[in-house]
Image (tube, rainbow, N blue to C red):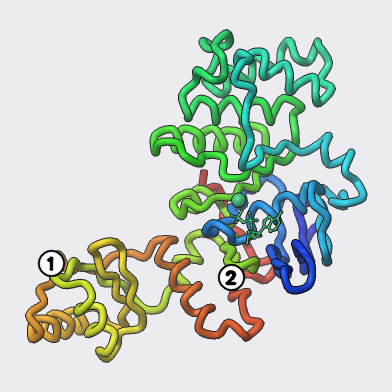
Amino acid sequence: MMDEARVTIRTRDLVKHFGRRKRRVTAVDGVTLEVRRGETYGLIGPDGAGKTTTTRVILGLLKRTAGQSEILGYDSMRDTYEIRERVGYIAQQFTLSRDLTVMENMRFFAQVHGVSPADQAHRIPELLAFAGLTQFTRRHAGQLSGGMKKKLALACSLVHEPQVLLLDEPTLGVDPVSRREFWNLLGNLRAEKGVTIFVCTPYMDEAERCNWVGLMYRGKLVAQDSPQAIKKLVPGRLLAFVPSQMAAAKRRVATLDGVLEVQTYGITLHVFVDEPERREREIVRALESEGVTCEGMREIDPRMEEAFISLITRQRSDLDTESVILPGAVPGAERGGDVL
Ligand SMILES: Nc1ncnc2c1ncn2[C@@H]1O[C@H](COP(=O)(O)OP(=O)(O)O)[C@@H](O)[C@H]1O
Ligand SMILES: [Mg+2]
């Protein structure tokens, strides 16, 4: 059995409905997950998957319909005060006060959380240094770059020294370099302070920075595992190439022996096959006979994105079955070490 003290966030068969009767939306549909102390758990999925609703129910900001949810052993609905004291949160729609300076935003958050003036005096400069904002303390938040705003939001969410941080799409709309910097900060937080991080994101590449990932789709977790293990859930091996005619190529390839699944990524076709060497020749021959050329044919390693699309596609084809949690999702399975 799991050591209870090591579980920071736990849900069991969590359900959240919005609306009634015919207009009912099941935003969270039986989600069971565990986030262990000190880990970075990524809840990954497309828009509308149910990530925000799950997060808000865990935090006690929304009433759950059924099931259980708790943080640090505190019940989401009953123990809201204890949770508020120990948990930091950046909402998806989080906005800083544009007309306040960086320093004033920090002080505002500190006051809301009842941080004493003495604690503020050392903690705020420390957090600003951590976020790389020391030289901008007097700048208005509205004047910061997108990436700096996200870092300030992070610094604000840490001002009461939470043990757990829930971040809802914290890098939405910022450039790749700033996203990288933000994730480096999260890595430092985890390494230096042992903060447990639960982060929602639609960016598949960010999943790689988590040490445990839950893939969410239509209110359900379709897989939970380490990023490495999830990438291995794809069927067979993966060939990629750029066909001269996409529609014709896709149609033809899908009918060939040994082809397990076909996905399109812009102008590139990704084909999962049983034996790459043999199937590569067969694909090229079959397409050439239809006047379609294949450029840059090669075997590639599946990324999180291919794995996710593959899992969703499989789920769609048997939508009625109660499947969903795949091997490795068993609570208590061994989890890999530091990724960040
Ligand atoms: N307050 C609400 N009232 C009705 N439906 C909602 C409400 N909030 C979210 N939903 C619906 O619940 C589903 C999940 O939404 P959400 O949790 O925001 O997903 P995500 O964060 O993954 O984009 C969506 O279908 C959304 O339209
Ligand atoms: Mg959301």
Decide if residue 31 is on the left or right side of residue 181: right
The residue nearer to you, when weighing 192 against 244, is 244
Q: Which class describes the residues within 10 Å of circle 1: few (<14), some (14-19), or many (20+)? A: few
The disc label shown at residue 222, or none: 2
- In the rendered image, which quarter is residue 307 located in? bottom left
In this orientation, does residue 16 appear?
no
- The amino acid beneath tag 2 is Val
The answer to which of marks 1 and 2 sits earlier in the sequence is: 2
Give the residue at mark 1.
295
Find numbered disc 2 in the image and state the secondary structure of the residue it sits on: strand
Q: Residue at x 43, y 73 (%)?
A: 234
Residue 290 vertical position relative to residue 52 in the rendered view, above or below: below
Give the CA separation, mark 1 to mark 2: 34 Å
Give coordinates of residue 101: x percent, y percent: 61, 13
| Residue 215 horizontal side relative to residue 78, left or right | left
Where residue 174 appears, as percent x and y from the top left, is 45, 36
User: Relative to residue 161, is residue 48 depicted above or below?
Assistant: below
Q: Is mark 2 within 8 Å of ligand 1?
A: no
Q: Amino acid at mark 1?
A: Glu
